[in-house]
Amino acid sequence: DQVAPQLSDIWFEHSEDIDDNLNYTVFMRVKDDIAGVSYASLRISPPSGDSGKIIYVPLQDLHEGTFNDGIIKGYFTVNKHQESGGWSLLYADSPAVHDNAGNRRVYSANDLTSLGIESSINITPDSPDQVAPQLSDIWFEHSEDIDGNLNYTVFMRVKDDIAGVSYAALRISPPSGDNGKVIYVPLQDLHEGTSKEGVIKGYFTINKYQESGDWTLLY
């Protein structure tokens, strides 16, 4: 079998969960006469083109028929605060269909048009949020442990009116600029207020033998 599997249709169904997120099922009608389809995939890209928001969807479950000639399906969820509008199905190697002999076909915009398949899906979340969170302050507190190391807590005052802040991060670089000594600090714990307007915190330790001087927060 050296013939790639065929795709003839794509469609979607969705429902809203109790948190107002959108739960989608995507269906593909596929055919592969000999080895049979092993799986298909989509990469769904938001209207902004932000690669950090791309949703990867594997389709591996058989919905109807057989893997030689049938319908397969996959699942994905769109958060209620995601972007609203036309999400493209054409990011990178998407859509793609694979068979059990290792053959693959990636479908282009022209391929989908010739099959009468829309190259995007209109997604309308309940509370779209495309505004980045705001930072208004950063400060530090520290103590010394019994071994002479410095244990720091870093605080950030943050605000995000709709979705709320999920986390923040710092990369703290030593005076020498040595990449091997850079400290990554995730801030995920709520110190006061709420995720929509409050103070979050994270933690890091400076070994007593580390460099002395001004460590930059701008790595």
Image (spheres, rainbow, N blue to C red):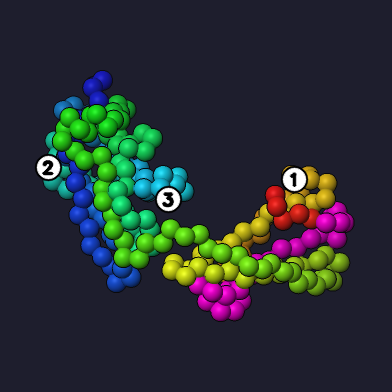
Give the camera-side residue of 213 and 149: 213
Q: At 58% from the left edge and 69% from the top edge, which residue is drawn? A: 158
Mark 2 or mark 3: which comes first in sequence?
3
Observer able to see residue 183? no
Q: Is 56 displayed left or right of 63 in the figure?
A: right
Say if the magenta span includes residue 62.
no
Q: Are marks 1 and 3 in contact (CB under 8 Å)?
A: no
Q: At 79% from the left edge and 45% from the top edge, which residue is drawn? A: 177
Amino acid marked by disc 1: Gly
Q: Is 126 displayed left or right of 65 in the figure?
A: right
Is disc 1 surrounded by few (<14), some (14 to 19) or many (20+) residues within 10 Å? few
16 over 83 or under it: above or below: below
Say if the magenta span includes residue 207.
yes
- Which marked residue is nearer to the observer: mark 1 or mark 3? 3
136 over 34 or under it: above or below: below
Q: Which residues are magenta?
A: 190-214
Amino acid marked by disc 3: Lys
Q: Secondary structure at mark 3?
A: helix
Amino acid marked by disc 2: Gly
Residue 119 image label: none
Q: Secondary structure at mark 1?
A: helix
Q: Position of residue 74 (x, y in %)?
A: 27, 49
- What residue is pinned by disc 2? 65
Q: At 25% from the left edge and 25% from the top edge, which residue is drawn? A: 4
- What residue is pinned by disc 1? 180
Give the camera-side residue of 143 and 32: 143
